[in-house]
Amino acid sequence: MPRGLQPNPHAKLRELLAQARDDAGLKQAQVAALLKRPQSFVSKYENGERKLDVVEFIDVCKALGVSPSALIEQLS
């Protein structure tokens, strides 16, 4: 879908990542530990203070046990 047709793709991605974390039964601190990052890293990308680059996105998906391509498919 062209970028102009979706109101806020970043907000949708944040929602999908938070939902995947909830579905995995993980707390932000647990995801952060898996990523070897502080809990604030997870909080910041979930609330929009920080955007993930592609490599970080893939690492987060692995930590959550979800396919990066499956999340991208839900985004589009």
Image (tube, rainbow, N blue to C red):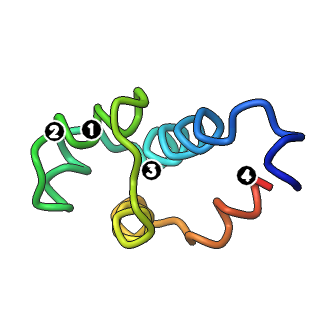
First reached walking from the N terminus: tag 4 or tag 3: 3
Location of residue 59 with respect to 28 vertically, above or below: below
- Circle 1 sits in a helix, a strand or a loop, which is it? helix
Amino acid type, callout 2:
Gln
- The residue wearing badge 2 is 39
How far apart marks 1 and 2 lie (CA) works out to 6 Å
How far apart marks 4 and 1 lie (CA) works out to 22 Å
Residue 75, position as x, y percentages in the image: 73, 52
Is disc 3 surrounded by few (<14), some (14 to 19) or many (20+) residues within 10 Å?
some
Amino acid type, callout 1:
Gln
Location of residue 13 with respect to 54 vertically, above or below: above
Picture quadrant where residue 47 is located: top left
Amino acid type, callout 3:
Ala
Which label lies toward us, 4 or 3?
4
- The residue wearing badge 3 is 24
How far apart marks 4 and 2 lie (CA) works out to 25 Å
First reached walking from the N terminus: tag 1 or tag 2: 1
- The residue wearing badge 1 is 28
User: Are circles 4 and 1 on residues that touch, CB within 8 Å?
Assistant: no
How far apart marks 4 and 3 lie (CA) works out to 19 Å
Which label lies toward us, 3 or 2?
2
Which label lies toward us, 3 or 1?
1
Residue 29, position as x, y percentages in the image: 18, 40
How far apart marks 3 and 1 lie (CA) works out to 11 Å
Is disc 4 surrounded by few (<14), some (14 to 19) or many (20+) residues within 10 Å?
some
